């Protein structure tokens, strides 16, 4: 069971920072290399520096999985094809920080700007095209922003939506009393493209750092079907008929003589009409958000919005901009173990808690009482046979965290069967979240 949480502690308007000056303080500190898993110093290259080996490497987020490698090959390792594919196939969701990484973004197809950029960078790098993350402050024209964020009708509501999702500096920009743009911190891709003279259509040797934002896009919105409006059902007439034929006893709070036959016939008629309008694909009746696709044969030379401030250009997402997961196990004596991982590193992985005997004496006792031969013959009854034979109070165990079945952390010794609590906490770069308590 999950324990009750104070709803006032939920991450709504609980931003820790909201200005570029404050949230960038931690940038350039220690990060983690996916290749050697060692702590490394992230040093931001100058905006116009030539590419380095870091701009082509795998990282925690950027992994050259078989799926990404195959997709890049299908796109002929061409930067125009790669950009168009990511733009046309990944739906934007406004959160801040690295959550999924490239592989999970490719699988889920709904990603924030960091994860969309990770996917774009992975496809470019596996195609031998250097690419970096580019941070900055942007002013998005209000009409484009309202469309991008979900067909909002009110600019202030859209800005609040961004802020509640943890986007730093989210707000409106006014001129002469009118809102003309939404300002926010953002991340996109800077790639070293063979831009002169083909504008990216032919990639040989790169010559230009080009800004590419596959997360920012426009959508076509289609209203869903009003099911009742598509039938002859008249709610007012339905209510009037029932009221006219029923007897209401207010004192007893009761109603009699309800025309149930009329109710049944009405809903049978409505059901028949609805059955006639339902297509094979029921999703077509629901509200639709469709990306307005791009098929440009070349890469644009500029971004589709004004950039108020160019921030750091980095080969890897800094650790302070990664979402993290912490799992800890406790008994009555205190904490037995704790495990922290960045979400992109464990996305698509299996994380589990397991237990092993604490000492050789515990192993010897278990082996002496467990009917091994019977368990082999009746594997479906293994747990019942084990716990019938073993006295838990005589055994101590170590809790373990396993990733894909491989032990990564071993905890302190505790009694088998002792009451334990598991705390799970997600940490975001700009939003404070409470720990969720589970009973082990």
Image: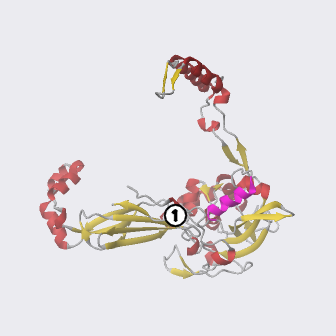
Q: Nearer the viewer, residue 180 or 27?
A: 180
Q: How many marks do you count on the picture?
A: 1
Is residue 311 placed above or below 98 in the rendered structure? below
The structure residue drawn at horizontal position 63% and vertical position 80%, both measured from the top left corner, is: 25
Dot 1: element: helix
x and y, in percent, of residue 84 in the image: 71, 56
Taken as a whole, is the magenta stretch helix, strand or loop? helix
Residue 163 magenta: yes
State the residue in front, 237 or 168: 237
Q: Is residue 262 left or right of residue 366?
A: right
Look at mark 1 in the image and give the residue it sits on: 9
Residue at left offset 51%, top offset 59%: 7
Can you give x and y, in whole percent of width and height, for residue 221 in the image?
Answer: 71, 45
Q: Badge 1, how many Cα within 10 Å: few under 14, some, many 20+?
A: few
Q: Is residue 105 magenta?
A: no
In the figure, residue 395 lies in which quadrant?
bottom left
> Picture coordinates of residue 80 (x, y %)?
73, 59
| Quarter that holds the N terminus | bottom left
Residue nearer the viewer, 91 or 239: 239
Q: Quadrant of residue 210?
A: bottom right
Quarter holding residue 111 = bottom right
Horizontal side of residue 361 vs 160, given as left or right: left
Give the magenta range.
154-166
Check the image and name the residue furthest to the left: 368
Residue 416: x, y in percent?
23, 65
Q: What's the residue at 64%, 36% (across, down)?
A: 285
Considering depth in this image, is 345 or 49 the residue closer to the camera?
345
């Amino acid at each position: 069971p999950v324990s009750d949480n104070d709803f006032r502690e939920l991450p709504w308007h609980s931003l820790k920072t909201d200005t570029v000056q404050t949230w960038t303080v931690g940038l350039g500190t220690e990060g983690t290399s996916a290749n050697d898993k060692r702590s490394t110093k992230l040093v931001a290259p100058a905006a116009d520096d030539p590419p380095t080996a870091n701009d082509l490497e795998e990282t925690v987020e950027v992994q050259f999985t078989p799926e990404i490698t195959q997709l890049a090959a299908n796109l002929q390792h061409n930067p125009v094809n790669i950009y168009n594919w990511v733009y046309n196939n990944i739906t934007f969701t406004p959160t801040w920080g690295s959550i999924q990484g490239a592989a999970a973004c490719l699988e889920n197809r709904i990603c924030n700007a960091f994860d969309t950029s990770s996917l774009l960078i992975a496809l470019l790098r596996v195609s031998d095209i250097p690419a970096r993350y580019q941070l900055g402050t942007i002013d998005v024209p209000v009409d484009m922003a309202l469309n991008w964020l979900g067909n909002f009708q009110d600019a202030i509501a859209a800005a609040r939506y961004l802020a509640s999702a943890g986007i730093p500096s989210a707000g409106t920009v006014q001129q002469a009393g009118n809102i003309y743009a939404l300002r926010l911190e953002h991340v996109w891709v800077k790639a070293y493209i063979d831009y002169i003279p083909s504008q990216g259509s032919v990639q040989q040797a790169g010559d230009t750092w080009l800004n590419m934002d596959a997360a920012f896009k426009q959508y076509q919105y289609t209203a869903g079907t009003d099911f009742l409006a598509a039938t002859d059902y008249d709610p007012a007439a339905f209510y009037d008929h029932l009221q006219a034929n029923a007897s209401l006893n207010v004192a007893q709070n009761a109603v009699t003589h309800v025309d149930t036959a009329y109710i049944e016939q009405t809903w049978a008629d409505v059901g028949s009409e609805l059955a006639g309008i339902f297509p094979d694909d029921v999703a077509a009746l629901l509200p639709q958000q469709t990306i307005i696709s791009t098929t440009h044969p070349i890469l644009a030379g500029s971004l589709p919005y004004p950039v108020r401030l160019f921030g750091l250009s980095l080969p890897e997402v800094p650790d302070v901009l990664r979402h993290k997961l912490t799992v800890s196990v406790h008994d009555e004596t205190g904490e037995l173990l704790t495990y922290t991982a960045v979400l992109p590193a464990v996305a698509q992985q299996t994380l589990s808690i397991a237990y092993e005997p604490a000492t050789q004496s515990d192993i010897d006792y278990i082996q002496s009482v467990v009917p091994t031969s019977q368990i082999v013959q009746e594997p479906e009854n293994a747990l019942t046979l084990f716990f019938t034979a073993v006295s838990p109070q005589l055994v101590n165990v170590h809790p373990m965290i396993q990733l894909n079945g491989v032990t990564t952390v071993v905890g302190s010794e505790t009694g088998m069967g002792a009451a334990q609590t598991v705390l799970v906490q997600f940490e975001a770069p700009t939003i404070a979240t409470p720990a969720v308590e589970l009973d082990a």
